[in-house]
Image (spheres, rainbow, N blue to C red):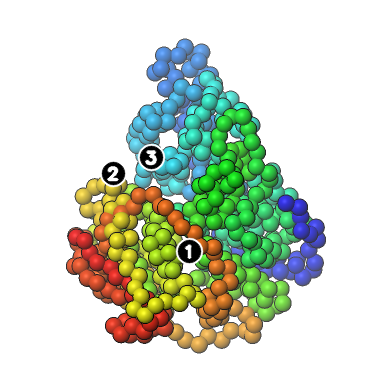
Amino acid sequence: MNPISYAGPTEADLHRNALLEKLLMDSGIYESTEETARREEVLRRLDLIIKDWVKQLTRQKGYTEKMVEEANGIVRTFGSYRLGVHGPNADIDTLCIGPSYVTREHDFFVILHNILLEMEEVSDLQPVNDAHVPVMKFKFQGISIDLLYASVSLLIVPEDLDISHNSVLYNTDEKTVRSLNGCRVADQILKLVPNVENFCTTLRCLKFWAKRRGVYSNVTGFLGGVNWALLVAQVCQLYPNAIPSMLVSRFFRVYTNWRWPNPVMLCPIEEDDLGFNVWDPRKWSRDRTHLMPIITPAYPCMNSSYNVSASTLRVMVEQFLFGNKVCEEIELNKANWSSLFEPSLFFESYKNYLQVDIVAADADDLLAWRGWVESRLRLLTLKIERDTDGMLQCHPFPNEYIDTSKPCSHCAFFMGLQRQPGVKVQEGQQFDIRATVDEFKQGVNSYNLWRPGMDIFVSHVRRRQLPAYIFPEGYKRQRQLKHTPEGSSSPSSEKRFKRKHDASGIGKPKQTSFGSPGIAEGSIPVNSGIEELACESSIAQKVAMESEDGANTESMQPSAIRLSLESTA
């Protein structure tokens, strides 16, 4: 895509940029020099462990001593660390590259796993070998590591191996390709942006914004780190001489007007004779179902945002519109940068919510169980869309909440529910999603590492019944008038904007039917939040969904929604 403008910054842009960079520094999204040094030391230690592991395996497999001496494995980084935009306490995405005779299934997930298990510096070791991209998660000296493995078609892995060449993919399987792709994509992004420093500052800013606004989570159907990086890189290409304050404003302008599902692509899609499938909606019917395609720039080019659903796309379009409105006010000196980073008023935005409680016998079990359930939550969104023909919109919120008063290890996720704005409903119409929730729970409970005590409870709660532990101070924020400078954004203006946006139907995604993969088992609701949740099961109960205007739920008007949940336990 050709640049839209080559214009550089004005004096006003430079002033706004200084204010933006000061806000980012004051927000604590940069790590200290001490933590940077700790990360470098951890990576150095991990590299030595990998090299010793490969040499040990080479000897065990009967190779000559000369081969053992030359045997090598290397560690590369990708994700936010490789792009230079990681913050304090962020994990490090790492890739271990080994020779052809070192296997993932046994040598990596058994031998290396056992080596790490015996090390005092390693904690929270969690192998996830059945993931789409198999990964070993752990903490090394307190720093979180996500370690992937790729075996390349070489007997000896050179220290300076260039993985940007497609030849590195020769004679590899799909999982290896996906494992290598993280590093290959990060390297390509840095090559394709016109100014790396401006790209990094802008990406830090947009990641911070996305987390504040509740739209940073690939696993729940929003966008993750690589997705935001690709969106920002596209804007950098469109405005090659712009500085971060300009790029942030242009980001919202571009994606407010983007016509999804037109794809975001940093470069033309590359074909190769290695035979791997690349994203091509003309050829593959699955690719035609993607709602917000953001294409990776390294072969084989893939859609990095296939998790996005109609509901999560709607939420992101709303947030782009909100960001664009605030940036317009900032450029008119009617608002400041802090207005852009106001946290999302998720728990004031809906009358009705689904509460998904996850419990386990202890913290270690909860860590594994929570990760599995969270990875399935987007399927619940898809199934609600499917089973209600898109008329019931579901907004999953990526933050987790913990009720420390529970006798067992616990965390909870929430989803906002509302009718699709502007759709007429018949008198007495209900959305009964009991079967949908049952199907979701059945699939979740098929977890092959399930242990006694692992359980999930899905319940309907109204806004006034939300549990106190989700609020920072332990109680619901009082509604009060807040003095706001003329023309600036505020929580109340955000809600007015949302109502206006919903009424007009701006940014409403195209209706799409979904056939989700397996999900499943019963819904167990409670009547007033989850305060009454025990670690066993809950009393079956039928609840009705509160009307959007707050009307009495037992005497519903025709425009109201009724939601029924009933236990199968």
The residue at 67%/79% (across/down) is: 334
Quarter where residue 126 is shown: top left
User: What's under tag 3, amino acid-wise?
Assistant: Asp
Q: Secondary structure at mark 2?
A: loop
Q: Earlier in the sequence, mark 3 or mark 1?
A: 3
Residue 554 or 206: which is nearer the viewer?
554
- Secondary structure, mark 1, is helix
Q: Residues within 10 Å of mark 3 (few under 14, many from 20)?
A: few
* Dot 2 and dot 3 residues touching (CB under 8 Å): no
From the top left corner, tell me how far across and down residue 395 is, in percent. Answer: 44, 66
Decide if residue 555 is on the left or right side of residue 162. Answer: left
Q: Is residue 504 above or below residue 513?
A: below
Of labels 1 and 2, earlier in sequence is 1
Measured Cα–Cα span from mark 1 to mark 2: 30 Å
Q: CA distance from mark 2 to mark 3?
A: 11 Å
Q: Residues within 10 Å of mark 1 (few under 14, many from 20)?
A: many
**Could you tell which of marks 2 and 3 lies nearer the N-terminus?**
3
**Comparing labels 1 and 2, the label whose residue is closer to the camera:** 1
* Residue 224 place in picture, x, y as percent: 52, 54
Q: CA distance from mark 3 to mark 1?
A: 28 Å
Q: Is residue 507 above or below residue 49?
A: below
Counting labels gives 3
Q: In the image, what residue type sits under mark 1?
A: Ser
Q: Measured along the vertical axis of the image, is residue 144 above or below residue 308?
A: above
Residue 311 has which mark? 1
Q: On residue 130, which mark appears?
A: 3
Q: Residue at x 62, y 84 (%)?
A: 485
User: Badge 2: how crowded within 10 Å, few (<14), some, or many (20+)?
Assistant: few
Which is nearer the eye, 34 or 261? 261
Tell me, yes or no, whether the two marked residues, 3 and 1, touch with CB atoms within 8 Å.
no
Mark 2 = which residue?
A: 449
List x then y, in percent, for residue 342.
Answer: 54, 72
